[in-house]
Image (cartoon, grey):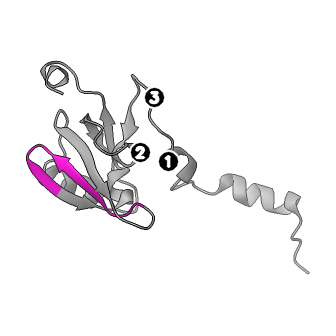
């Protein structure tokens, strides 16, 4: 007979890798902090800080860089699909793309710095 008690399941759960945490991904960014592109409100002007691809899709980092998601680039969400907010319509520089939330969650953003901040 298999032991299904909470105490027997705890070690397996505690050692399981965490690959996605909706509570963190859906948290709204606070002033002065970084966030992911997936967390932004519509029209919120930000700047790309970094791209971090998930372990299951390392090629996403190269693909996102190829289409313009590079550090320092201005970015904002123009709209979200319904229902569920997927995909996101995103403006990067002068280009517009549709990204899945999982892809947008790979893009770290921050408030515009320097000259870009003065033009928003």
Q: Which residue lies furthest to the left in this view?
A: 94
Region rendered in magenta:
85-96
Distance of mark 3 from mark 1, alpha carbons?
A: 12 Å
Q: How crowded is mark 2: few (under 14 residues within 10 Å), some or many (20 or more)?
A: some
Instruction: Check disc 3 and report the residue beneath it.
Output: 30
Residue depicted at 38% across the width and 58% down the height: 102
Q: Earlier in the sequence, mark 2 or mark 1?
A: 1
Residue 64, which numbered label?
Answer: none
Q: Residues within 10 Å of mark 3 (few under 14, many from 20)?
A: few
Residue 79: image location, x then y, percent: 29, 55
In which quadrant of the rendered view does residue 100 lie?
Answer: bottom left
Q: In this view, does 111 lie to the left or right of 34?
A: left
Is there any visible trace of residue 21 in the rendered image?
Answer: no
Q: In this view, does 113 lie to the left or right of 55?
A: left
In which quadrant of the rendered view does residue 73 lie?
Answer: top left
Circle 1 sits in a helix, a strand or a loop, which is it?
loop
Residue 10: image location, x then y, percent: 79, 56
């Amino acid at each position: 007979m298999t032991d299904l008690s909470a105490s027997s399941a705890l070690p397996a759960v505690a050692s399981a890798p965490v690959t996605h945490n909706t509570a963190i991904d859906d948290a709204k960014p606070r002033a002065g902090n970084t966030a992911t592109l997936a967390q932004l409100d519509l029209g919120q002007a930000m700047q790309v800080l970094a791209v971090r691809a998930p372990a299951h899709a390392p090629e996403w980092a190269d693909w996102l860089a190829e289409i313009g998601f590079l550090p320092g680039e201005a970015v904002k969400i123009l709209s979200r699909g319904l229902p569920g907010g997927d995909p996101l319509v995103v403006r990067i520089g002068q280009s517009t793309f549709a990204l899945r939330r999982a892809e947008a969650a790979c893009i770290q953003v921050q408030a515009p710095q320097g000259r870009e901040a003065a033009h928003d």
